[in-house]
Image: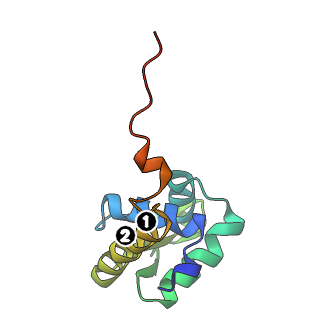
Amino acid sequence: MDLRYLTPAVVRMLQEFLRDPDRTYYATELMGAAHVSSGSFYPAITRLERAGWIVVEDEDIDPRKEGRPARVYYRMTGEGAREAHISLVELSESVRPPATSPGWLLGPKPKAV
């Protein structure tokens, strides 16, 4: 995925998925775990689905019998887990200061006496 599509919401969702790539989430569960609002969640989840990184499955229940609407479940694909990991590493490397940066040369902060 192009790094410009790795918004903060997408990054947090990918990090949550990568904690356990075999886990299945429903929307409000994933939004809470990734600390993402619904306004950020749905565009991001659509982008991930179109990329083939997640699959979306509808819960097979009778909403009247259960007394609630059917949930939509999201699960990361094997390719999604692999590509997400690579993309997050590339993002990290793109924002990491070079080793020649003055911040690296200063070393650890001295302890206060």
Observer-nearest of 19 and 98 = 98
Instruction: Determine the secondary structure under disc 1.
Output: helix
Q: Check if mark 2's residue and mark 1's residue have beta carbons within 8 Å.
A: yes
Observer-nearest of 58 and 17 = 17
At 41% across and 47% down in the image, what residue appears? 105
At 61% across and 58% down in the image, what residue appears? 36
Relative to 8, say whether 35 is above or below: above
Relative to 73, say whether 57 is above or below: below
Tell me the amino acid under the disc marked 2: Val
User: What residue did someone put label 2 on?
Assistant: 89
Farthest residue, direction top:
113
At 63% across and 74% down in the image, what residue appears? 42
Tell me which corner region of the image, top left, top right, bottom left or bottom right, holds residue 88: bottom left
At 47% across and 85% down in the image, what residue appears? 1
User: What residue did someone put label 1 on?
Assistant: 92
Rendered location of residue 32, percent (x, y): 56, 52
Q: Residues within 10 Å of mark 2 (few under 14, many from 20)?
A: few
Q: Is residue 4 left or right of residue 86?
A: right
Tell me which corner region of the image, top left, top right, bottom left or bottom right, holds residue 19: bottom left
Tell me the amino acid under the disc marked 1: Ser
Observer-nearest of 94 and 79 = 94
Rendered location of residue 67, percent (x, y): 59, 59
Q: CA distance from mark 2 to mark 1?
A: 5 Å
